[in-house]
Image: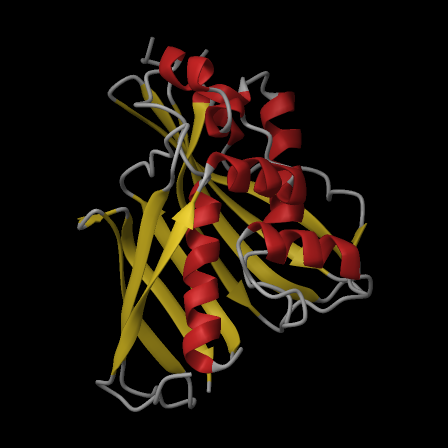
Amino acid sequence: MSTLTPGAELAPRTYDVTRADLVAYAEASGDHNPIHQDEEVALAVGLPGVIAHGMYTLALVGRAVAEWTGDAEVVDLGAKFVAPVVVPAEGAARVTVAGTVGERTDDGLLPLALLVTVDGAKVLGAPKATVRA
Amino acid sequence: MPIDADLVGRAFPPTPPRAVTAEAVAAFAAAVGRTTEGPVPPTFPIVVTFAALQDFLAAEQVELSRIVHGDQRFSYARPVVVGDELSATLTVTGVRSIGGNDIVSTSSEITDAGGAVVCTATATLVHRGGAA
């Protein structure tokens, strides 16, 4: 758990995402869109390959926030999916979630400024999480 | 097939209530590498939101493989807990066309068994009509 004082940097977390993870996630979430599992379908609709569910990447943000804050209550979470996270058939995509603690709001909530990247390139736009902590 | 702009403002019927079981939460948490003892992951409500989205796409005869997620936000009135029974009511809030793709904005209200709002989920779906 990190110190949650405004301006504090949160230690970046890096998570591997494999195709097996996407299969497990499809099962758990009900999102069986084949673009997250089947290379042929993904390429046929013009994608660069099998891509992670946007919600998988956002779930990793939730995971990082939980690890940083000791499972604090999340009151707001969201992002734009600005670049696909391509998951190779072998090995993994590596998603890094970095963050900084923002200024406490008048109602006592703590916004976290986030940066979510794969190989240094942003995959989420305007990622936002606000916690009660 | 383009998505009909007349859909804007239309609310779809609520999804059947879905029980938030310890097993479902554990499977979801494990899939994203979280411990299964902690609180319900904040993105878990996507399970009911996605059911509502699928009903919408089926009604519009849109192929799921042509959809990518543009954005997603959750605003929580309270955390989801095991034992909840959640239902999502989806409203189409916007349809616009950019470069051969239809951008559909939606807002889903997720309510518990008592009808109280647990979470509001807004999503943008990109229907990739132009590709391939």
Q: Which of A77 and B29 lies nearest the eye of the viewer?
A: B29
Q: Position of residue B105 (x, y in %)?
A: 44, 40
Q: Position of residue B120 (x, y in %)?
A: 56, 58
Q: Position of residue A12 (x, y in %)?
A: 29, 68
Note whether residue B27 is visible: yes
Residue at 47 percent of width and 47 percent of height: A56
- Whether residue B122 is situated above or below residue A31 in the rendered picture: below
- Whether residue A71 is situated above or below residue B92 in the rendered picture: below
Residue at 22 percent of width and 49 percent of height: A122
Residue B34, quarter of the rendered image: bottom right
Q: Which of B125 and B4 lies nearest the eye of the viewer?
A: B125
B98 sits to left or right of B47:
left
Residue at 38 percent of width and 34 percent of height: A87
Note whether residue B2 is visible: no
- Whether residue B75 is situated above or below residue B54 in the rendered picture: below
Q: Which of A54 and B17 lies nearest the eye of the viewer?
A: A54
Q: Which of B76 and A72 lies nearest the eye of the viewer?
A: A72
Residue at 29 percent of width and 77 percent of height: A10
Q: Quadrant of the C terminus of chain B?
A: top left
Most distant residue in the front direction: A90
Q: Position of residue A123 (x, y in %)?
A: 27, 46
Residue B61, quarter of the rendered image: top right
B92 sits to left or right of A16:
right
Residue A108, quarter of the rendered image: bottom left
